[in-house]
Image (cartoon, rainbow, N blue to C red):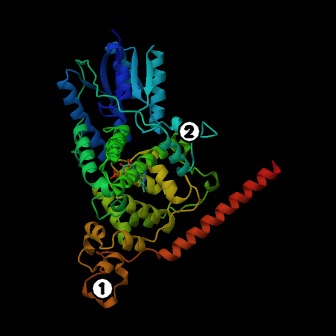
Amino acid sequence: MAVNLIWFRRDLRLHDHPALTAARARGAQVYAVFCLSELDALNARQRAFVIATLRLLRQTLDRLDASLTLLPGDAPVALSAAALRLGASHVYCTSAGGRERIAQDRAAQALRLKGIRLCTESGSLVHDPDAVADRKQAAGEGYRIFPPFYDAWKALPVVRPLPQTAPNARDADPGPLPSGALANIGVGESHAWDLLQRFLAGRAADYATNSEYPGRPATSELAPYLRFGVLSSRAVYHAVAERMSRSWTLAQERSSMEAFLRRLAQRDFFAQLAHYAPRMHDEPLQAKMRGFSWSHDAHFVRAWETGMTGYPFVDAAMRQLQAEGHVHQRAAVCAASFCVCDLGLDWRIGRDIWMRELLEADDAQCDGNWQHIAGIGSDQAAYPRIYNPVRQAQIFDSQATYVRRYCRELSRLPTQAALAPWRLERQQQTELGFFTPDQYPAPIVDHNLVARGFLARYQAYRNRSEQAGARAAESG
Ligand SMILES: Cc1cc2nc3c(=O)[nH]c(=O)nc-3n(C[C@H](O)[C@H](O)[C@H](O)COP(=O)(O)OP(=O)(O)OC[C@H]3O[C@@H](n4cnc5c(N)ncnc54)[C@H](O)[C@@H]3O)c2cc1C
């Protein structure tokens, strides 16, 4: 009988798992393994989440008379040793992108030297990057802007999720699970499914309207489960599509669910950008913007990172990030825009802080979103996303619900003052004991002034690059 390993990575589930299904084909004996060195690339919140998820997965497999072996040491070496010890001829895994792709390639090489094959299957996205790119006239290089990608994405049929399956062999020496801090949210497949079902039964109907308002509980909160593959994005797609197709679903609810599916497409889009341009982790996707000079001002970094810029909407976002490892999308966009456009800070500084704190942190998604906001990544009309942090708060947090939740020192101020505290009369400031040094700061920059300055520098650099490019093309 064939013996295979299933190498769990960011696909910590048993449902709709193409690599696991392939490993189990033709009655093979399948051992499950996870390489502990992969925890090193995660932030502290993610490590706690993954360890708790692995603990639960282990318990589930134990009930099915199977096991989950935890391999210490360098992944390629550990995998080869485990495959030899357990007598496996093939190792199966879900194909990875970015930095995880490097580990995958190294593992394939190490296994090959021992006569063992690494077999990869898709399974992280709704559509594989190549499947979408194949619809392009110039195939093989992916899409650089979202709208045509989305058109191609929508036109493809989504593969039906595979039935649940499981490893079926028990390793006598599965190794200990490292101890970890408690995860700050629920873990495991059942929990993720419940969350999805609750979203579909409630928030999904008004998602299009409500999801832009950070004070409202309106989004799915599925990001960490999608990030670590506890939920398959194809299964999520089909669960939403099934709701949309019900005859009693209202047109308004349907368009809300459509807006949600568009978000899943955005996730696929950023993953395909990283797939075709892995260098975008370090440098702008837009060649024209390479070499643009960014600030590294430590005082600005500290104020932004700790939520002390004096702009409450930005500060609330940064404090939510630090406290919960999550930021509402609308607030995240404003905070990121303030970092690069108002403070002129290097987008990689903001990105790295996000990667250090965010539970769903992921290279492709983080790089893609940050570059988009800085106006150096995917773009249709190339310009930086400059948001007025006060106007955004007045539109999307008009009752200051979100600001008051995270900036406690502003919680007792009248609404307009909570959104722009420096506009309070000096007299009122004193009465409220407001601008004492250990309380909320005055704005560290004047948004109108610095944003205009940034835009001018951005445009000048872009024009110079375009002219240099045109001259090079003429002379070449
Ligand atoms: C600067 C910045 C950095 C980000 N970094 C990450 C990251 O590292 N990892 C990550 O998963 N998301 C990232 N996002 C996207 C987004 O903030 C979160 O995915 C979202 O807030 C998760 O909440 P939710 O699950 O309730 O989302 P919902 O609104 O319910 O959306 C459903 C799903 O769609 C996907 N999605 C939604 N918006 C985006 C988006 N803008 N880009 C990509 N996918 C999206 C997520 O998987 C999300 O779970 C970033 C956004 C910004 C502005």
Q: In this orientation, which residue lies closer to the viewer: 118 or 205?
A: 205
Q: Position of residue 339 (x, y in %)?
A: 46, 63
> Dot 2 lies on which element?
helix
Under mark 2, the amino acid is Ala
Q: Residue furthest top?
A: 1
Q: Amino acid at mark 1?
A: Gln
- Identify the image quadrant of residue 33: top left
Residue 260 coordinates in the image, percent (x, y): 38, 51
Q: Nearer the viewer, residue 47 or 221?
A: 221
Instruction: Looking at this view, name the residue that lies furthest to the front.
Output: 247
Q: Quadrant of the N terminus?
A: top left
Is residue 231 shown left or right of residue 158?
A: left
Quarter assignment of residue 14: top left
| Circle 1 or circle 2, nearest the eye | 2
Kindly check if marks 1 and 2 are in contact, taking CB atoms under 8 A apart as contact. Answer: no
Nearer to me, 126 or 49: 126
* Number of numbered discs visible in the structure rendering: 2
Please tell me which of labels 1 and 2 falls first in the chain: 2
Q: Nearer the viewer, residue 164 or 214?
A: 164
* Crowdedness near tag 1: few (<14), some (14–19) or many (≥20) residues, C-alpha within 10 Å: some
Which residue: 26% across, 73% down? 409
Image side of residue 143 versus residue 390, left or right: right
Q: Which mark is residue 133?
A: 2
Vertical order, 99 against 417 (above or below): above
Which x, y percent locates residue 369?
A: 47, 53
Q: Which residue is mark 1?
A: 429
- Direction bottom: furthest residue: 427
